[in-house]
Amino acid sequence: MGRVKVGVVGCGVISSTYIKNLKNFDVLDVVACADLVLERAQMRATEFGIPKACSVDELLADPEIDIVVNLTVPKAHAEVTLAALESGKHVYVEKPLAIHLNDGRRILDLAKSKGLLVGCAPETFMGGGLQTCRKLIDDGWIGKPIGATAFLLKSGPESWHPDPEFFYQTGGGPLFDMGPYYLTALVHLLGPIRHVSGSARITFPERLITSEPKFGQRITVEVPTHVVAILEFDNGAIGNLITSFDVIHSEITRKIEIYGTEGTLSVPDPNTFGGPVRIRRQGAERWDEIPLTHGYSDNSRGIGVADMAHALRTGRAHRVHGEMAFHILEVMHGIYTSSASGHKYEVTSTCQRPSPLPMGLLPWTLD
């Protein structure tokens, strides 16, 4: 069976990592890339030996392409994804699925009506670190999960990112930018979320860019930059989530812990694929680091696209699926709604926990 042909839309900073990894999977063949700035697409095509650099419209019209990988900025996610689906392409999109909840629903409805697959980052839960955590929880190492904490506490990206404005526009902020990593990890480990309560604020209405090439320019902040939430899971566990671009220093910068009736699991940074994974069971005098049970512990962005390709070939469910991405999108909107209303928000969507990866996979294989 031939390889599944892929076209990449959006040739910015993250595209380099994606394309490098996509080309390592035998199931995939990257045949085209596109960007609003054609020179960016031409640069990536030259860098990675991609046969065609073109406009977005040309890529979507190419009948050879099976999967569109949408790496555009968040405000363009829905538009590009919907256009790709209308063109008869399966789509894998960077997080979040969309900015607005109704656009996320439109994406799922259109894909269903056309018999197409939609997948959405983050796929970091498929890495060795979070797969090891999943196995430990499923095998009962910490007993019944009762709670979780998740923290992303840092200053903003205007000090290092070359184009940081979108982080502070609608669809950005710490919740929509980084929250999907934490929420997806928690749903992968604990299952879907039933209710959320939230509080959010804008601490600094204006940000000064100190990175190049836009050093000295100022950004007007449109979205909350410090967000706190309580999450109530279907399985009865209760967690709390804090995402912030306002914290100067913290000793718990990026952290998830899962609490169970028989112990606690220390989960690695969900924006990475590896470890460390640590556990301390009831009665233990110290924390033990657990060797990773699965591979893909290095930066493996693109693994979700490969998983979708295998699903297309075999008919099995794909793990980084649109229903989970929509559930995460609703949870994030629910946190903002709760903050504005002062009331708990009932999450109307749900999703299946993605199936764990098999153990013992060879590099760059999934099935």
Image (cartoon, helix red, strand yellow):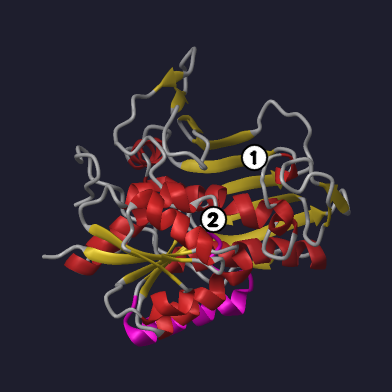
The residue identified by callout 1 is 151
Cα–Cα gap, marks 1 and 2: 27 Å
The residue identified by callout 2 is 12
User: Which structural element holds mark 1?
Assistant: strand
User: Residue 349's spot in the image, x, y percent?
Assistant: 52, 71
Q: Nearer the viewer, residue 193 or 335?
A: 335
Magenta stretch encompasses residue 311: no
Question: Does residue 302 appear in the picture of this structure?
Answer: no
Q: Nearer the viewer, residue 273 or 326?
A: 273
Dominant SS in magenta: helix
User: Residue 16's spot in the image, x, y percent?
Assistant: 45, 49
Q: Nearer the viewer, residue 181 or 54?
A: 54
Question: Does residue 202 appear in the picture of this structure?
Answer: yes
The residue located at (44%, 41%) in the rendering is: 144
Residue count near mark 1 (Cα–Cα under 10 Å), binned few <14, some 14–19, many ≥20: many
The count of marks equals: 2
Magenta stretch encompasses residue 101: yes
Above or below residue 115? Residue 314 is above
Question: Tag 2 or tag 1, which sits nearer the N-term?
Answer: 2
The residue located at (51%, 68%) in the rendering is: 326
Q: Amino acid at mark 2?
A: Gly
Q: Residue 92 occupies which quadrant of the picture?
A: bottom left
User: Residue 360's spot in the image, x, y percent?
Assistant: 19, 37
User: Which structural element holds mark 2?
Assistant: loop
Q: Nearer the viewer, residue 360 or 279?
A: 360
Q: Amino acid at mark 1?
A: Phe
In the image, which residues are magenta?
Answer: 95-116
